[in-house]
Amino acid sequence: MNLILRPNCKHRVSVPVGIDVQLESIASVSEVNMDFMMTFYLRHQCPDYWKDERLSFPSTTNKSMTFDHRLIKKIWVPDTFFVHSKKSFIHNMTVENTMLCIHPDGNALFSLRVTVSAMCFMDSSRFPLGSHCSLELESYAYNEEDLMLYWTRGNRCLNTDEHISLLFFTEEFSASSRFAFYSSTESF
């Protein structure tokens, strides 16, 4: 059994993967560099958000099993990337900050702690109120027929501490979904 192939690839059924974000910090917002940097936990959630029946296992207690980065490199996981990212990295102190939790029925939670520096197209017409910066997530290799990313709980999928929103934001966080079409490939 090849666990590197995405689930349901033989049947050409799209894999629904729910995501949510827990914002840890915003390190900077630079008008000069037209970018912002933030650290957060990106979770590809379960239950019923990403299921790979090949990972199911018998359990009398119905308890999940948790794994670190070593197993993650041997199985299929969503290939989420950040559009307009200048630089991003998964934290690795003292080990790579990734986690996989698998439930007996094959539902999975894939979580990683990541820092992203992304472009923010500053809008001086709103001075001194600042600009609207966004962070877009997409699948890198899989089109809409293979993988469907969606926000698990709409606008409530972006979580943050109150002190972050008070210091940096006057508006609410919001989540939106759309397809990105690339003329050389397909819809993502």
Image (cartoon, rainbow, N blue to C red):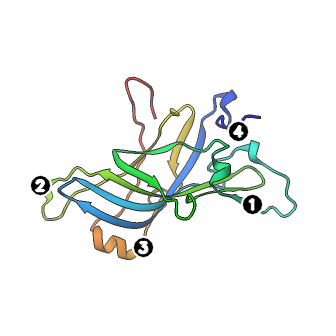
Relative to 26, is 75 above or below? Answer: above
Q: Circle 1 sits in a helix, a strand or a loop, which is it?
A: loop
> Which residue is under mark 2?
125
- Residue pointed to by mark 3: 161
Circle 3 SS class? loop
Real-space CA distance between mark 1 and mark 2, rounded to the nearest whole angstrom: 51 Å
User: For this rendering, which residue is in front, 126 or 137?
Assistant: 137
Q: Nearer the viewer, mark 4 or mark 1?
A: 4
Q: Looking at the image, is 7 positioned above or below residue 150?
A: above
Q: Nearer the viewer, mark 4 or mark 3?
A: 4
Mark 4 — residue? 3
Tell me which label, 1 or 2, sits earlier in the chain.
1
Which mark is nearer the camera, 2 or 4? Answer: 4
Q: At numbered mark 4, what does the secondary structure look like: helix, strand or loop?
A: loop
Q: Specify the amino acid type for callout 2.
A: Ser
Residue 187, image x, y percentages: 45, 31
x, y (%) of residue 35? Answer: 26, 54
Q: Quadrant of residue 27?
A: bottom left
- Closer to the chain start, of discs 2 and 3, is 2
Amino acid carrying mark 1 in the image? Ser
CB under 8 Å between callouts 4 and 1?
no
